């Protein structure tokens, strides 16, 4: 069965979640709801490495901020690319609240999309894309 990973916002446990059940996903540890936008979940600086380590597939991350116009257009496209897609784990990072993570990755402009494989960065794309662009970025890794 196809699966993805997400960190629980309440207890910070990393959960392996069946894609078919993403809409009603709850944390296996504390039973809090795990929120997906499409198959995209939000991740914090503290939980990021844990998900990278747990994942047996590439992890694609949208670095965004609420004030960023192009990010508002890109978000739904990134989400669209994630729907029904078990090729990768889709995460998004709010660069305002998670400045530590975006700083450590040297992100200067947003939106910025980074693909990680086996815990290492393998691809970085600056700027907004459509859903097809996200998919082709993934198929290039
Ligand atoms: Zn939890």
Image (cartoon, helix red, strand yellow):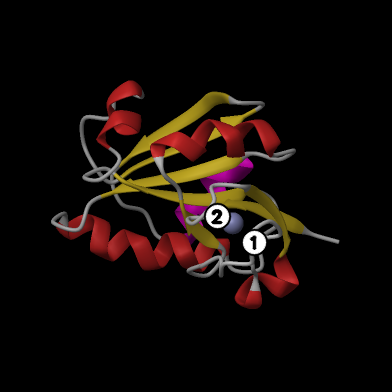
Give the CA separation, mark 2 to mark 1.
6 Å
Q: Residue at x 54, y 47 (%)?
A: 12
Q: Is mark 1 within 8 Å of ligand 1?
A: yes
Does residue 88 lie above or below 23 as drawn?
A: above
Q: Secondary structure at mark 2?
A: loop
Counting from the top left corner in percent of width and height, residue 23 is at 61, 76
Residue 53 painted magenta: no
37 relative to 12, above or below: below
For the question of whether residue 5 can be seen, the reply is yes
| Residues at marks 2 and 1 touching, judged by CB atoms closer than 8 Å | yes
- Please tell me whether mark 1 sits on a helix, a strand or a loop: loop
In percent of width and height, residue 78 lies at 44, 59
Numbered badge on residue 27: 1
Q: Which residues are magenta?
A: 131-141
Say which residue label 2 marks.
8
Question: What main secondary structure does the magenta stretch of the protein show?
Answer: helix
Which quadrant, please, contains the C terminus? top right
Tell me: is circle 2 under 8 Å from ligand 1.
yes
Residue 138 percent across, percent down from the top left:
58, 44
Q: Is residue 19 left or right of residue 128?
A: right
Mark 2 or mark 1, which has the lower sequence index? 2
Ligand 1, image quadrant it occupies: bottom right
């Amino acid at each position: 069965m196809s699966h993805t990973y997400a960190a629980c916002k309440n207890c910070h446990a990393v959960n392996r979640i069946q894609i078919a059940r993403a809409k009603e996903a709850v944390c296996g540890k504390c039973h809090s709801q795990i929120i997906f936008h499409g198959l995209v979940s939000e991740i914090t600086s503290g939980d990021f490495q844990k998900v990278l380590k747990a994942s047996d597939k590439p992890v694609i991350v949208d670095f965004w901020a609420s004030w960023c116009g192009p990010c508002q257009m890109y978000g739904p496209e990134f989400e669209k690319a994630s729907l029904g897609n078990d090729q990768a784990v889709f995460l998004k990072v709010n660069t305002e609240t998670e400045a530590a993570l975006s700083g450590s990755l040297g992100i200067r402009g947003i939106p910025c999309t980074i693909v990680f494989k086996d815990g290492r960065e393998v691809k970085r794309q600056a700027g907004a894309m459509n859903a097809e662009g996200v998919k082709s970025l993934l198929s290039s890794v």
